[in-house]
Image (cartoon, coloured by chain):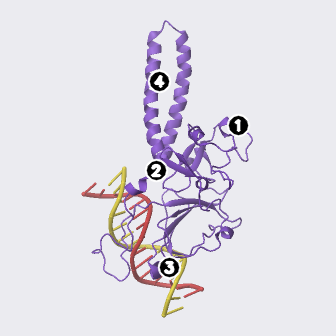
Chain colours: A purple, B yellow, C red
Amino acid sequence: MGENNCWVRQVVITELTKGKEFLLQLQKHVEHMKQDVCLQYLATEVLSSYDKVLSLLNGSALSSMINIKAAPSAAPQLESPQFPADNSAKSCDRPSISRKRKIVSRRREYVHARSGEEVPPEDGYSWRKYGQKNILGAKYPREYYRCARNRSSNCAATKMVQRSETEESLAFEVSYGENHSCGQEKKNQNEELVAVQQTKCDHEIEIGAGEISEFDILEMVSTPNNLFDSDFISTPASSPLPDTNYPHNDDSLTDPLFNHDVPDKSSVDDFISPYAQWDSHDAAVPYKLSFPHSYNKQE
DNA sequence: AGCCTTTGACCAGCG
DNA sequence: TCGCTGGTCAAAGGC
């Protein structure tokens, strides 16, 4: 839900930015009309208002879009079934798992299905499904999984799988909860994953207080209301950030921002703004890079 | 028998 | 306070 707010905010920012551009053009015209001081004054005041609103929105938008790695310590502590916060709630042999909605820092991944299959590729762990829920506004139900060794070893690992809305490219958003404490070894994951990412990340680039890693930037397939074209950019193994020769498949896009191979740290801010949106929700989760439909597309 | 999935119910967070 | 929503429980049935 916060994600929607983020999108709405981004749309507001985009529209305000456009409005400001129009206003700047208007102001240039007004400047030639030197006798009309009133018009010049009004244009300056409106422009000032735009600037104030945009600076406010950009500040809050970025802080919510870019995850702060230091945040987990400040975030609510995870409620572990092994150490229930309230033991009085239930008295049974099984660890008391509260129904209280957990505020969990989730690691989110986007994976593509194998061609011809309608299930997400295995991630190397054994999972047991414990629930399924129709999510408001989602075309497909969300599935809830718990570590298959949950009972035997009290492993608290969980994951949620949400099928993507788009039909063009079958993808799944997989959110992982707590880490495995059962010592379960991953199967040969490289063979299992058709997905775009998953290897251990050694390379990270800081953006302000947040961090983006090469494996955190993936290909995105769906966006709310199709307001934005989103792209998860795959990354060569040797580079700290994905190849930004954007687009990969569409030569009609010619923004100079994307005409360099790998952005250095100082260019990332330009890389982000004003039209692209980095979207992250947790530490070490994928970042979604989104572009408005019309972004620099040549007619 | 044991493990799995399915599914309606339950419950807490949130606006 | 209340209704909506999402996360989880747990019974039932299948394998």
Look at the picture and state if A80 lies above or below A224.
Answer: below
Question: Where residue A1 sits: x, y (%)?
Answer: 45, 53
Residues at marks 3 and 4, CA–CA distance in whole angstroms: 60 Å
Residue at the (46%, 28%) spot, across then down: A51
What mark, if any, has residue A254 been given in the picture?
1
Residue at numbered disc 2? A68
Residue under mark 1: which chain is it in?
A: A
Q: Badge 1: few (under 14), some or many (20 or more) residues near its Cα, within 10 Å?
A: some
**Three-letter residue code for mark 1:** Thr
Real-space CA distance between mark 2 and mark 3, rounded to the nearest whole angstrom: 32 Å
* Position in image of residue A175 (x %, y %): 52, 62
| Residue C3, percent from left and from top | 35, 58
| Comparing labels 1 and 2, the label whose residue is closer to the camera | 2
> What is the number of the mark on residue A47?
4
The front one of A288 and A41 is A288
Dot 3, how many residues are within 10 Å of its Cα: few (below 14), some (14-19), or many (20+)? many
Q: Amino acid at mark 4?
A: Leu
Badge 2 or badge 4: first in the primary sequence: 4
Q: Are marks 1 and 2 in contact (CB under 8 Å)?
A: no
Report helix, strand or loop for mark 3: loop
Give the left or right position of residue B12, taking residue A238 as reference. Answer: left
The kind of residue on which mark 3 rests is: Arg
Q: Chain of mark 4?
A: A
Respond whether the residues carrying marks 4 and 1 are from the same subunit. yes
* Helix, strand or loop for disc 1: loop
Question: Relative to A85, does residue A287 appear above or below in the rendering?
Answer: above
Mark sitting earlier along the chain (1/2): 2
In three-dimensional space, the C-alpha distance between marks 3 and 1, rounded to whole angstroms, equals 51 Å
- What residue is drawn where x is 47% and y is 77%? A150
Chain under callout 2: A
Question: Which comes sooner in the sequence, label 3 or label 4?
Answer: 4
